[in-house]
Amino acid sequence: MIRRAPHKTGRPWSPAALLVAITVLAAAACSPGNTAAAKKDSIEYLSVVQADVPALDPAQGSTSGQTSGPLWIALYDTLVNITPDGQIEPRLANEVTSNDDATVWTVKLRPGLTFADDTPLDGEAVAAHWRRLAEPEVASPAQGDAAALKDIKVADDQTVVVTLDEADAHWPTRLASSALALVPSPAAVKQHGKQYGTSPETTVGAGPFRVKSWQRDDRVVLVRNEDYWNSSQVALNEIVYRIMPDPSLRSKTFTSGTGDVNAVQTAGDDLVKLREEHDETAWESVGGLSIAFNVRDGHPTSSRTLREALVAAVDIEPTLQRAVPGAEPVRSLFVDSSPFSAPVEMPFGDKARAQELVDRYLAESGKSSVRLTWVVNQQFSTFAQAFKQEWDKIKGLDVRIEVVQSVLDRNRSRDFDLTMSGFGGGTPRVLVDLLLSTEKATNLTGISDSELDDALGRYLTADGRETERASLEQVQKRLVAELPYLWAHRLIASYFARDGISGLKILTDGSLDFASLKAGA
């Protein structure tokens, strides 16, 4: 969900620790001979990515998130955007339509699109990009999305027709939120091969900006692309995209008064102060940060009885105050303003029930206690300790926190009883396809429930909003019935603007659109 209207607020707040802060800063530009304050035409964007991207190749990118999402969109634009109410907003593509059963989709491009190297962005360019994403050697995070395109045909210069491997009434959401939407110049990809995107000279997109310079682990300087299809609406001439993972440095930079727009997803007093002093535009995810239980055979958490005990043992609000002060609990999967919100809540805060369930589990298993391994990285160790304090109050529960360097490796091998998970994203489509479907490799918990799968299938083939609502309400009911996840707190992306900065537009999954920003005197 996106809250478009800026507002002043002093309420305590702490969004997800999973995503971290980004700051957008602007520097004044003065015209020769003009001693008065001139219109700003450059911003400096302080990114929290922990390391520089290895290459500016969209095969390794995504349109989602506050960290690198704005960079990819600045360089390549996106074929379409999905608005908060689920509508398709044209960008490079004018139109995305399907046949009656949503197995065949047609993408029509704007006429006359070109890349920064003056080659055409046409149907052949889109098809070449999608075929490349499916190649195993490219190792794109969007390989699964591309592999789902069973057949790709170029009908004419502006038209690409794809046949999916299964019906999907929400395929435009998959298109908008993955590397499918970020098309590079095929000529440049062919010319530079594995070196594509490793320097300004080897990076060629059709977005509102192009690469001027790149200092590794420091900054990428972007300049306005005069050949962009909507160039007349782009107000900024330059963006300095900084690699700055130190949160204290980012905070000091903005609070010193030198910044114009600050994008934040961390907890603490600094954020409370920002809400008191600056306007805010925010985006809220479906679901949020969650604890995933491994429900596969051989793990204690395969017991639904034990999973309910772990949820019931947690008094969620005081626990979050210790873990991430001010965070908003996820009591139900969708925010109240969502058309898919349903009165389905996690069974938190009943320690008597939790003890009863643990006692039952131990009696049935013949054990005196149950040991569970919770795999986290250092970033979430404090968060984990707050929940462990709740579970330590239940006799017979022994939750051990294991801090590891790579949670991803452990998750891939399914070597955990509990682990952290960002649950949901910006749209229901991400939720149902990636995290819950039995057949998906990205089903982290291993949940396999026929009623859940049936509800997911009805959503994916829904032909109207009422069918979508009914199927997603059933999805939520089955998730609370089976409890593969403990929903913890919302993921919220907030952007704070100083006076004179306008045009903050948040795209599909929380990325700021640099092309829409305007900076006054």
Image: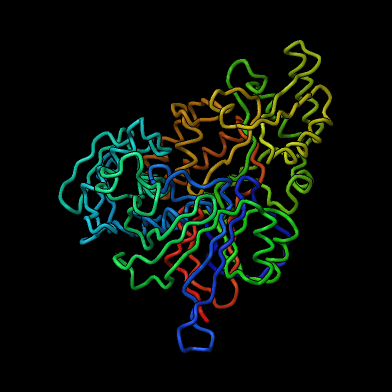
- Confirm whether residue 463 shows in the render: no
Q: What percent of the width, then of the height, locates residue 127? A: 25, 43
Instruction: Give the residue at x 29% y 52%.
Output: 96
Find residue 170 and report its image quarter.
Answer: top left
Q: Is residue 241 above or below residue 186?
A: below
- Residue 227 drawn at (x, y percent): 29, 65
Res 287 quadrant in image: top right
Q: How is the image coloured?
A: rainbow
Q: Is residue 33 above or below residue 318?
A: below
Q: Position of residue 342 (x, y in %)?
A: 57, 47
Question: Is the residue 205 above or below the residue 55 in the image?
Answer: below
Give me the residue at 34% from left, 50% from top. Answer: 202
Front in this rendered view, residue 435 or 231: 231
The residue lying toward the viewer, choosing from 250 and 350, is 250
User: Is residue 518 in sight in this rendering?
Assistant: yes
Left or right relative to 363: residue 452: left
Number of marks in the rendered image: 0
Residue 36 located left or right of residue 386 = left
Q: Residue at x 71, y 28 (%)?
A: 402
Most extreme residue toward the left is 156
Placement of 305 over or under 89, stated as above or below: above
